[in-house]
Image: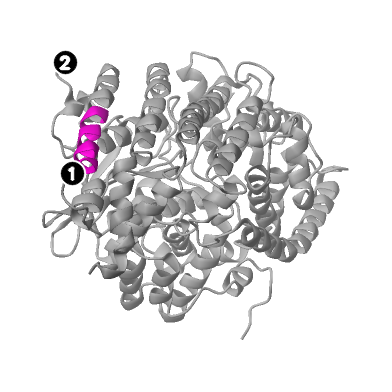
Amino acid sequence: MDNPLLKSFDKAPFEQIKNEHFKPAFLEAIENARKEIDAIAENTEEPTFENTLEALDFSGKQLDRISSIFFNLNSAETNDEIQKIAQEVSPLLSEFSNDITLNESLFQRIKSVYEQKDDLDLTVEQQTLLKKRYKSFSRNGANLNDTDKKRLREIDAELSKLKLKFGENVLAETNKFELLLTDEKDLKGLPDGAKEAASQLAKSKDKEGWLITLDYPSYIPFMKYAENRALRKELSLAFGSKGFHKDELDNQENVLKIASLRFERANLLGYKTHADFVLEERMAETPDKVQQFLTELLEKAKPAAEREFAELQAFAKELDGIAQLEKWDSAYYSEKLKQKLFNLDDEKLKPYFKLENVIDGVFKVAEKLFDLNFKEVFDIEKYHDDVKTYEVYDNSKNLISIFYADFHPRPGKRGGAWMTSYKSQYTFQGKNSRPHISNVCNFTKPTSTKPSLLTFNEVTTLFHEFGHGLHGMLANTTYPSLSGTSVYWDFVELPSQVMENWCYEKEALELFAFHYETGELIPMELVQKIKESATFQEGMATLRQLSFGFLDMAWHGTDPSNIKDVKKYESKAFEGTNIFPETPETCMSVAFSHIFQGGYSSGYYSYKWAEVLDADAFTYFKENGIFNKEIATKFKENVLSKGGTENPMTLYKRFRGAAPKIEPLLERAGLIKKTG
């Protein structure tokens, strides 16, 4: 077979790839990578850093490229066939990964170099690689006996399948639900843009009326603006009960199995719980520290959240006689209250945030801060017409990165927003190989009468994912495994979250927030209102984030083997953070893809952890000017370009001159009064 994936390529050959290419490519690439590993393990020369650690880090590049292309497509442009292939190849990849980690000869060579580390003249990056690689072997079973190694392989193979199944069920549930409305009065309150999008969606499926789905661009406007409370309830319960219907797409059993297998795996490796295992390689270090961190924030946020809830409850009662505020009322009445308090709503803001202008704006911010120039190009292959492709240059015309951007929802694409990489940055044989980075989001599509206009929340999402993108694009390390976003999980959100801050700043908004019809710059009173409203219901928002962190730690920081009822267990975990009445029909855990499919198990707290870092970091910019070149350069050189080459706290202190303080976050959130 003439397989494009098995040829030498720089940019992903998306337009030449067919589904039938994937499995043969995986099988051959695994075989090739296996030969490379065997050559390192069986080398008769004395183990050195170069012939063992370095050789290992640069091995398997072909397999890495094929995996990145395939699994990104499985998220952004999947179909039944791709999902089937994913189920077939995931256990093979898991087995191959174990073959490396459990390769006794290879581990002995690494161990030999590790034991000499103090006598070797290694750079800081080389020391990090050696330590990280040795720990990755010992943390993944290299020191186990044969029986336990066999069990570890079984667990990993099963987990890889369960996680895929979990995600497939959530996606299938999302795609399955449709709310078809045929009476226009059921759309009362909905903005024209949302109505038009619902009408177009119905037409695209040969249906009469207006179609509302569980995709965010459809779901969120309905929950925020639709006056029909019964329909909001129906939609909210559908959204909250994905994977919770005791049918073939039910995820309860998958959740219990994943949690139990992770616990067993941690025990096998000598750790008390999965959280103990994960957090050893995080800035937070231990489950106790995470619990303390979440609890400290809870103490600060809960009084504010309770006040905000009481205010919202009173407002809903006064406005519509609502005796008890329910979850499906939250977005609706919050939006109404926000409009009353700030005379500000998304519909007023959206005309100033045409997608193309916001993209241009984030590029201009990157140019002013980091000397990056983005040029849209049309000769790079892509996997869907929606995808835009760019070449990124520095001021000296050096190519820094290839950038892919994919911004609209479609049936084969999972919800949410993420950054990913099709090719890591690394330096090999004197050549700095530049990365290929992608941002994937789910923003409202243009309609026949309007371009894609973003809510302010979508603007911050775009800046957030672009921050991750910069972390990948500006990577400048030697080894691929330490490059870009290959950092401690509770540090990875710093570049993304810090970028959101520019969305609230007049100087940044002046670069791109122009009315799509009149070209008028966003009025500064609206900018002031955006800033004032930024802390609106921040107590409730913080409590919501903390509840997810506590739920994550409940699943992964204890022995889950006696849990029989997923919903009951979840409700107990939420006890300290609940302000809305319980809804027995819904369950968060069974659709909590971040922790049961993605990489956030025992790591959900890291969003808040990174907020502490980002608030502290942005304070530094604010004190010296948000486009201060000197500070931007310090951020680029000490954070964005360094990847995982050093301990993140060391990198942060080098940028900031001190450890981060929690006060800037609490002040920004309005949870404590500003000092000074």
Q: Main secondary structure of the magenta part?
A: helix
Give the class, few, some or many, for how many residues have Cα within 10 Å of label 1's Cα (few <14, many ≥20): some
The x, y position of residue 72, in whole percent, is 36, 34
The x, y position of residue 416, in whole percent, is 49, 39
- Quote the CA–CA distance across marks 1 and 2: 33 Å
Does 261 appear in magenta?
Answer: no
- Residue 341 seen in the figure: no
At mark 2, the secondary structure is loop
Residue 334 horizontal side relative to residue 152, left or right: right
What residue occupies the far top of the structure in this picture?
Answer: 206
The residue shown at (59%, 71%) is 662
List the residue tagged with mark 2.
Answer: 1
For the C terminus, the image quarter is bottom right
Query: Closer to us: mark 1 or mark 2?
Result: 1
List the residue tagged with mark 1.
Answer: 43
User: Which span of residues is magenta-colored?
Assistant: 30-42
Reply above or below: 46 against 242.
below
Reply above or below: 326 against 542.
above
- Residue 133 seen in the figure: yes
The residue shown at (27%, 48%) is 424
Instruction: Say which amino acid is labelled 2.
Output: Met
The x, y position of residue 375, in whole percent, is 21, 50
Residue 57 horizontal side relative to residue 145, left or right: left
For the N terminus, the image quarter is top left
- Tell me, for residue 603, which label it has, or none: none
